[in-house]
Image: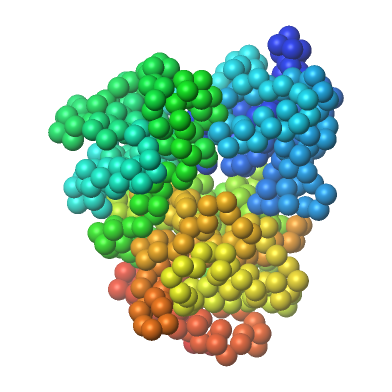
Amino acid sequence: MNTAAERIERLRNVMKAAGADWYICYTCDPHGSEYINAHYREREFLTGFTGSAGTVLIGMDKALLWADGRYHVQAEKETEGSGITVMRMGDPGVDELDEYVRKNVSAGEKIYLYGRLVNAKDGRKLAKAAADAGASLRIGQDLVSAIWTDRPADSAREIRLLPEELRGASCRERLAGIREAMKKAGADTHILSSLDDQMWLFNIRGADIEYCPVAYAYTVIKEDSVILYVKEDAVTEELSDYAWDENIVLRYYEDFFNDLKEQDPSSKVLISPEYTDYLTVRLLEHSSAKLIEAVNPSEKLKAVKTEKEIELIKESYLKDSAVLTSFLKYVKENAGKTPSDEKLLADKLDGMREAMPCCNGLSFSTISAFGPNAAMMHYEATEEDHAAIGENGFYLVDSGGQYEGGTTDVTRTLAIGDVSAELKRDFTRVAAGCLALQNAVFLHGCTGRNLDVLARGPVWELLKDYKCGTGHGIGYMLNVHEGPQGIRWKPLENEAVLEPGMLVSDEPGIYVEGSHGIRTENILLCVEKEKNGDGEFLAFEPLTWVPIDLDAIDVAALEPKERKQLNEYHAEVCKRLSPLMNEEEREWLKKATREV
């Protein structure tokens, strides 16, 4: 029997014993993290689907997996033969989970999920759907634990302090900004669950989640006190001394829930429903505390980088661009001519990055994909499952590093051998979209939704679309995906105005299942352009300096403005990278950035 099918059957036996008709696993940890420690990957354990997002609903006679547009192809491939039906989110006629529950769960049935592994926003949405169906929702039991006998241990690695020279601002300055926001919101207490916000606030970093330098923690902020709950094994003498100096009370992570039960019922508690788990919110509601629900104040404060952080980020991106360009040179000169595969190339690039003294590892698992595999946006080549690099086709590499001074993310697609006119056309329109957004000038007050069409428009001209956003924020020595800003055409619940100092990715693409995938990604810094009688104008400054493969460009398909933008970008790439390269690399770079 398929491993996933076997596990689901074992879970159904546990469900029967518990009286559950349905069981739901979100992709979540108690802090609403995007990427999660192996200990919390219950959905992956059950289904075999390894994507970073998705939700599974298990009934007695069906199993359904919701996956967004980034993972449609991957989810179907990884669950083949398991009996799981992939619900392709965003496709016509595919209900969201809550709507499916309303239509398909019968009155009197019981839906179980573990309330610590779903955020309050999704938990409430599901609770309403269950109530509308006449069903009940139970959130106190983790039924998967009963069958996951070799579950990986939870993590509690040592927390490190950022050196003074890498701190964009002091902890006290950041606390003052949060307390000011609390006051405006009418809150006397703020419970901060999101891990990267806490790392940013205290100028600390951890290692509890792969690729994300965060530590498991909770923070409770009041007007005259701040408590940081961390795991006992994570505490060092350096952290204890720092906490004493900064008037931070250190308590153990496990004490958080006990302290929560003692919450003053008159408290006005500010929380983010996206990052606070549903069980915590239910406990707060039971205490009669007044909940004030909003985006964490730290989210926007963290998104606007300080001058010091920007300086260090620029240095990191330049070094990272040089390493990636050296790798692209290697691929262009060898792929299709000497035997190679996706995994070998990923390992080579990873090794090149990690050999840099300033690099602390990768910012996410490298996507190294050839031909049809590149159509899976978050594909990962493994020892067991990878493709050879063929003589003709597109090779896509999406990668990044964690540096002492920045977090990087960049994608390039390369033509290997001969590629068809259709593939060149697709590549050219993707590159044109990336450059159009990169060169945008816009008024302050715009959100990413106002700008998305600049990148997506050239793709739409081909009557194609990429089923994901165009861009996301990026952390400073933190998570590679960060809010609240983003670039996408669909409305967001909490759309953020773009501010000088914010970073966004610029990554349009085309993904044709079974054929090819194309993505060109640069990271952009929002900057002030000019203030005049018509308003405050902003623009973007690219941080990524990596050639766009001219062998895949159909020059005749470029508009004059697009050709000018490509040539200007390449001239700057050559100027900035040349001092970091040897003579052979510089010669290759000159050709790769030649004027067209």
Residue 373 in the figure: left or right of residue 325: right
The quadrant the N terminus occupies is: top right
Q: Is residue 128 visible?
A: yes
Q: Is residue 36 above or below residue 523?
A: above
Viewer-side residue, 493 vs 562: 493
Which scheme is used to colour this image of the protein? Answer: rainbow
**Which x, y percent locates residue 292?**
46, 37
Percent x, y of residue 273: 52, 37
Question: Residue 322, can we see it?
Answer: no
Q: Relative to 214, is 69 above or below?
A: below
Q: Quadrant of the C terminus?
A: bottom right
In the rendered view, does 528 fall on the left or right side of 20? left
* Closest to the observer, 518 or 550: 518
Q: Position of residue 409 (x, y in %)?
A: 46, 57
Q: What's the residue at 73%, 68% (across, down)?
A: 464
Seen from the viewer's position, the closer of residues 381 and 79 is 79
Farthest residue toward the top?
Answer: 17
Using the rendered view, name the quadrant where residue 305 is placed. bottom left
Vertical arrangement, residue 442 with respect to residue 518, above or below: below
Q: Position of residue 4 (x, y in %)?
A: 73, 28
The residue under the point 38% across, 84% down is 533
Q: Residue at x 51, y 64 (%)?
A: 447
Q: Residue at x 26, y 25 (%)?
A: 250
